[in-house]
Image (spheres, rainbow, N blue to C red):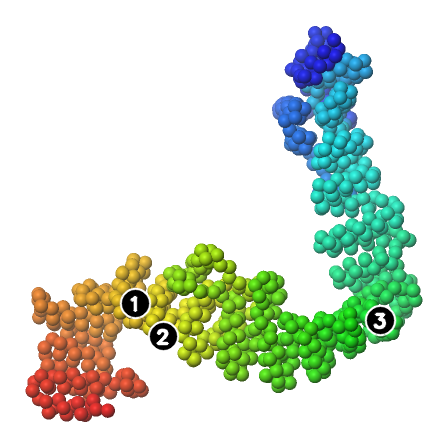
């Protein structure tokens, strides 16, 4: 029967939460209901503290209501966790959120920082104590459990849970009951709740962590071990297990933090140093050099008797990598027996204060004879970087060169030589580099480059030239060596050799250029080579090199569709997007290895591009000029500045304007310039030039559309008037010209001339009403035009209008006055002198009147060359 009862209880163990207990026990429970508001008490409060001394009754009522709500929420969370609806992590998080303001204040006072593994925790759980009645019920449940009455024990514990959901004892008893029933998962659930409510037992948390691992829940085991470490921060075994679990789940950051705290807790020297060494290596691999240094330094200071030369060497390498030369010198003094003498009076050991200013006060450096060469080298580096003179380093350098073979210790030689070069002690670095370049293992391009730099700084130009040439032989793609060699050759007046040394540095192949420094080096070589070729006048070679540099940053335009796409939009972004779509259609990926991250000078690139355009134009290579200017429109480097983009638009227009076969693209380019630069007359003039190239009148609709966008533009209104005049709609043209005269507000000669000519054309039409009135108006505008521009040109235009209107005698008078007037511009008579045109029109009038002799005379006088 007990087995059946236990089975029923196992099938539905949570009915007891609804109060399903025996009738006898129910009578006991009713007596306990009055204690529901204060069943769980703090250790620091009296047992019978059913009421507190609260000054404000209303606040006490509010706090009591909050406490009751919080207790209900905790009871619900406990039920959900037991039912498996939430995980233990969610249970603990929500329980923390359910704290009342008073409890939250206590919780915040006990919370730790994120680096809780880096220092021992002082967080202590707030122990809870049940009232005596419930303690007796828990004791009765334990007796039932001992007798094997599991169902009764579970019901009693559940009732205690219902009445005091934050008490740990019933959950701990339930954990033992379910463990005896062979249900480890439910036992672990109740035990975890009990441990959470009473978190001071590190052994219990450790046991629960082991049980979680047995059930395969590593994250829950980690949470248990974290609580165990908080309960017992000095337990190194718990920290070590926690480190292993963090490493198992791949949480490297927490594992490192835990290992760091473990190192601080360990008391054995060898084990601590070994762990510190490994921890420092991991931090160094992750790029945390400062943390790695501090970890190893703490271990060295903590166990100086167990330190080996490998530990000191590793610590010094980390310190030198961070340029901590003073700290490294102190370590060498403390652990390697290095002495700087003489010490000032009153000082027995070397300290930071003595190294703050300079090492000039020391006269010699004593080093133990058994000190390894790698530590000696690091000592030299510290002395050199801290400004130690020859009195401190000369003997150490001599010993290094006499007793060490550069074939075996070449890396040490190179480190010392680079340090000496960095502090401008070239004369001392030269013998070290000379020894290295003559070795088989270290006669590499990088060493030859350093050797050449050292010789150059010492003024040995010929020897430096040979060293750089050797560097280029060993590393043909080394850009810095070629640039340095070029500079040396130019200094010696060997320009052709300087150009030749840069010629073999071609552009990189696709996929071989991803580093910004390599991009900058390759671009600098090409740019320098192009500049030298330009200065030396080698046009063809310059064009080839400049085009190679141009292709490095400009996407290629290879198909007619791609070419046309450049003129279908007027913005850099629109052009690049259109080009990208066309690339995707033909599955093409451009290789532009020179990017904006390369750091190359954009101004020098742009200047090289302008020189390339000048050379192509001077040689008449219009197709190449059109190609490079069009590709420059989508260059990410040349379009970074607004003024450069403006100049690129103009250059592209100019390249296509000079080719009559490209009038379509010329017009498209000019049409795209007008909206962007509507306030500039230069843009409208370019548009007018493009319109003159096209045999088709296709600008009318474009200009009319622009009127809605720019209704106050004078150049646009003038173009609309011209379009109307040319197309024969003279009234529309007259309206535009009159409106512009009102906008300008002054006697503009061009507008007056155009308005007068419009009236002349209207009056000459076959069906014109009020013809005489139109003639008077036309003569009025033309007269104003003559007064606004008193010149040969104005008299000639007035004569032409009178000739068209049928007043030959008045036209002859104007022509004669024009002949007697000098040109407006004295220079360039073939452009500004109109006497030939005037004389020809006069001869036509004379011929029409029958006076051929006078006509021939005026032609012979003014029109014969």
Q: Which percent across, then down, holds residue 626?
A: 41, 71
Classify mark 1: helix, strand or loop: helix
What's the mark number on residue 658?
2
Count residues near mark 3 (Cα–Cα under 10 Å), then give few for <14, some for 14-19, many for 20+: some
Residue annotated with mark 3: 405
Q: How many numbered markers are drawn?
A: 3
> Residue 34: x percent and y percent?
69, 14
- The answer to whether residue 853 is left or right of residue 863 is left
The answer to whether residue 204 of the structure is visible from this angle is: yes
Q: Which mark is residue 715?
A: 1
Q: Position of residue 622 (x, y in %)?
A: 40, 75
Q: Mark 3 and mark 2: span between their CA atoms?
A: 70 Å
Q: Could you tell me if residue 64 is visible in this image?
A: no
Q: Name the quarter where the C terminus is drawn.
A: bottom left
Which residue appears at 87% of the width and 58% of the height? 309
Q: Residue furthest front?
A: 586
Please tell me whether residue 204 is drawn above or below residue 533 in the rendered image.
above
Q: Is residue 298 above or below residue 410?
A: above
The mark nearer the N terminus, 2 or 1, is: 2
- The correct choice, above or below, for 616 with respect to 354 in the image is below
Earlier in the chain: of badge 3 and badge 2, it is 3
> For the residues carrying marks 3 and 2, which lies nearer the camera in this image?
3
- Name the residue at the left extreme: 850
Looking at the image, do the residues carrying marks 2 and 1 touch, with CB atoms under 8 Å apart? Answer: no
Q: Name the N-terminal-most of marks 1 and 3.
A: 3
Residue at the extreme top of the image, as rendered: 23
Q: Does residue 354 appear to the left or right of 558 in the view shown? A: right
* Helix, strand or loop at mark 3: loop
Residue 597, quarter of the rendered image: bottom right
């Amino acid at each position: 029967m007990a087995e059946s009862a236990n089975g029923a209880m196992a099938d539905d163990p949570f009915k007891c939460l609804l109060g399903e207990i025996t009738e006898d026990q129910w009578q006991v429970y009713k007596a306990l209901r009055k204690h529901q508001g204060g069943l769980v008490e703090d250790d620091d409060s009296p047992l019978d503290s059913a009421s507190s001394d609260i000054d404000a009754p209303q606040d006490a009522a509010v706090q009591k209501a909050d406490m009751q709500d919080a207790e209900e929420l905790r009871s619900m969370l406990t039920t959900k966790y037991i039912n498996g609806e939430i995980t233990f992590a969610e249970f603990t998080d929500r329980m923390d959120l359910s704290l009342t303001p008073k409890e939250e204040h206590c919780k915040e006072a006990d919370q730790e920082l994120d680096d809780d593994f880096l220092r021992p925790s002082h967080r202590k759980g707030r122990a809870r104590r049940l009232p005596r009645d419930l303690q007796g019920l828990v004791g009765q449940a334990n007796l039932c459990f001992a007798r094997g009455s599991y169902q009764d024990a579970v019901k009693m514990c559940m009732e205690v849970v219902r009445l005091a959901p934050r008490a740990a004892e019933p959950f701990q008893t339930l954990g033992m009951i379910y463990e005896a029933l062979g249900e480890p998962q439910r036992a672990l659930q109740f035990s975890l709740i009990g441990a959470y409510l009473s978190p001071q037992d590190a052994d219990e948390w450790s046991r629960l962590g082991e049980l979680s691992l047995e059930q395969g829940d590593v994250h829950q085991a980690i949470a248990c071990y974290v609580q165990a470490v908080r309960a017992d921060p000095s337990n190194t075994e718990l920290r070590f297990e926690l480190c292993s679990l963090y490493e198992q789940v791949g949480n490297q950051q927490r594992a490192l933090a835990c290992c760091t705290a473990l190192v601080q807790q360990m008391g054995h020297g060898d084990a601590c140093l070994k762990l510190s060494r490994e921890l420092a290596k991991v931090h160094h691999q992750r790029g945390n050099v400062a943390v790695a240094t501090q970890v190893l330094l703490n271990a060295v200071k903590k166990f100086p008797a167990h330190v080996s030369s490998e530990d000191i060497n590793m610590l010094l390498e980390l310190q030198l990598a961070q340029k901590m030369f003073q700290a490294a010198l102190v370590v060498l003094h403390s652990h390697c027996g290095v002495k700087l003498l003489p010490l000032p009076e009153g000082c027995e050991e070397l300290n930071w204060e003595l190294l703050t200013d300079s090492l000039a006060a020391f006269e010699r450096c004593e080093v133990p004879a058994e000190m390894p060469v790698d530590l000696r080298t690091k000592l030299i580096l510290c002395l050199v970087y801290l400004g130690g003179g020859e009195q401190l380093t000369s003997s150490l350098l001599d010993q290094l060169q006499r007793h060490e073979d550069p074939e075996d210790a070449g890396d040490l030689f190179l480190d010392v030589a680079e340090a000496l070069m960095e502090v401008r002690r070239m004369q001392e670095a030269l013998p070290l580099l000379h020894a290295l370049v003559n070795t088989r293992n270290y006669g590499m391009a990088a060493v030859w480059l350093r050797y050449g730099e050292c010789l150059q700084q010492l003024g040995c130009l010929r020897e430096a030239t040979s060293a750089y040439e050797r560097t280029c032989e060993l590393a043909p793609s080394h850009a810095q060596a070629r640039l340095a060699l070029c500079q040396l050759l130019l200094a010696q007046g060997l320009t052709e050799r300087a150009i030749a040394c840069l010629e073999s540095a071609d552009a990189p192949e696709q996929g071989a250029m991803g580093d910004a420094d390599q991009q900058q080096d390759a671009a600098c070589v090409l740019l320098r080579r192009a500049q030298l070729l330009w200065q030396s006048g080698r046009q063809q070679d310059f064009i080839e090199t400049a085009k190679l540099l141009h292709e490095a940053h400009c996407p290629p335009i290879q198909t007619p569709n791609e070419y046309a796409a450049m003129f279908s939009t007027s913005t850099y972004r629109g052009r690049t997007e259109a080009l990208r779509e066309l690339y995707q259609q033909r599955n093409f990926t451009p290789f532009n290895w020179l990017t904006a991250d390369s750091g190359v000078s954009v101004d020098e690139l742009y200047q090289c591009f302008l020189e390339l355009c000048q050379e192509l134009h001077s040689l008449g290579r219009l197709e190449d000029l059109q190609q490079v200017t069009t590709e420059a429109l989508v260059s990410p480097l040349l379009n970074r500045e607004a003024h450069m983009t403006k100049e690129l638009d103009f250059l592209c227009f100019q390249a296509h304007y000079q080719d009559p076969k490209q009038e379509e693209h010329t017009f498209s380019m000019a049409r795209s310039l007008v909206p962007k630069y509507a306030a500039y007359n230069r843009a409208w003039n370019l548009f007018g030039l493009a319109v003159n190239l096209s045999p088709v009148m296709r600008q009318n609709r474009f200009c009319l559309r622009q009127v809605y966008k720019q209704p106050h533009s004078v150049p646009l209104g003038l173009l609309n008037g011209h379009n109307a005049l040319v197309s024969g709609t003279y009234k529309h043209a007259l309206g535009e010209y009159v409106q512009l005269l009102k906008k300008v507000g002054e006697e503009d000669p061009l507008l007056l001339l155009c308005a007068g000519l419009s009236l002349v054309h209207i009056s000459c039409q076959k069906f014109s009403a009020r013809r005489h009135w139109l003639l008077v108006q036309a003569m009025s505008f033309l007269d104003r035009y003559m007064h606004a521009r008193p010149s040969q040109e104005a008299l000639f235009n007035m004569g032409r209008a009178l000739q068209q209107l049928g007043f030959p005698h008045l036209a002859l008078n104007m022509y004669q006055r024009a002949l007697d007037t000098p040109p407006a511009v004295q220079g360039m008579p073939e452009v500004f002198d109109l006497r030939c045109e005037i004389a020809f029109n006069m001869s036509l009038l004379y011929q029409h009147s029958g006076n051929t002799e006078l006509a021939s005379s005026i032609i012979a006088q003014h029109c014969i060359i």
